Image: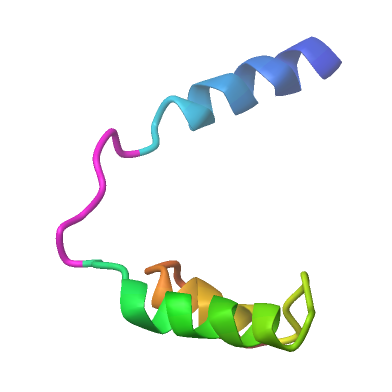
Amino acid sequence: MHMVRHQRNQELMRQTPSSVSSAVLPNKLAAKSILDGAFADGRNYFNLPGNLQSALGFMVLNC
């Protein structure tokens, strides 16, 4: 069963788009601002990762 699941997962991974959509453009200035603020505070982690992900153009689901 493991081999069957592995093969299915491999097939699913090959179905991903080969290029990035031009409709989603990262906001580099906002991302840099978030990172600069964290580093200025002496942090190397982010307690609001959704903001950074959104700025970089990733979809964020708020559940």
What residue is drawn where x is 67% and y is 85%?
40
Q: How many marks?
A: 0
Please indicate, yes or no, whether residue 1 appears anywhere in the rendered image: no
Q: Residue furthest left?
A: 22
Locate residue 59 relative to residue 48 in the image: left or right. left
Residue segment shown in magenta: 17-23
What residue is drawn where x is 34% and y is 79%?
29
Q: Quadrant of residue 51?
A: bottom right
Q: Residue furthest right?
A: 1
Main SS class of the magenta portion in the image: loop
Q: Quadrant of the C terminus?
A: bottom right
What residue is drawn where x is 41% and y is 68%?
56
Asked if residue 19 lies in the magenta stretch, the reply is yes
What residue is drawn where x is 54% and y is 83%?
34
Compared to residue 59, the image places residue 63 above or below, namely below
Q: Quadrant of the N terminus?
A: top right
Q: Quadrant of residue 25?
A: bottom left
Residue 3: % across, % down: 78, 11
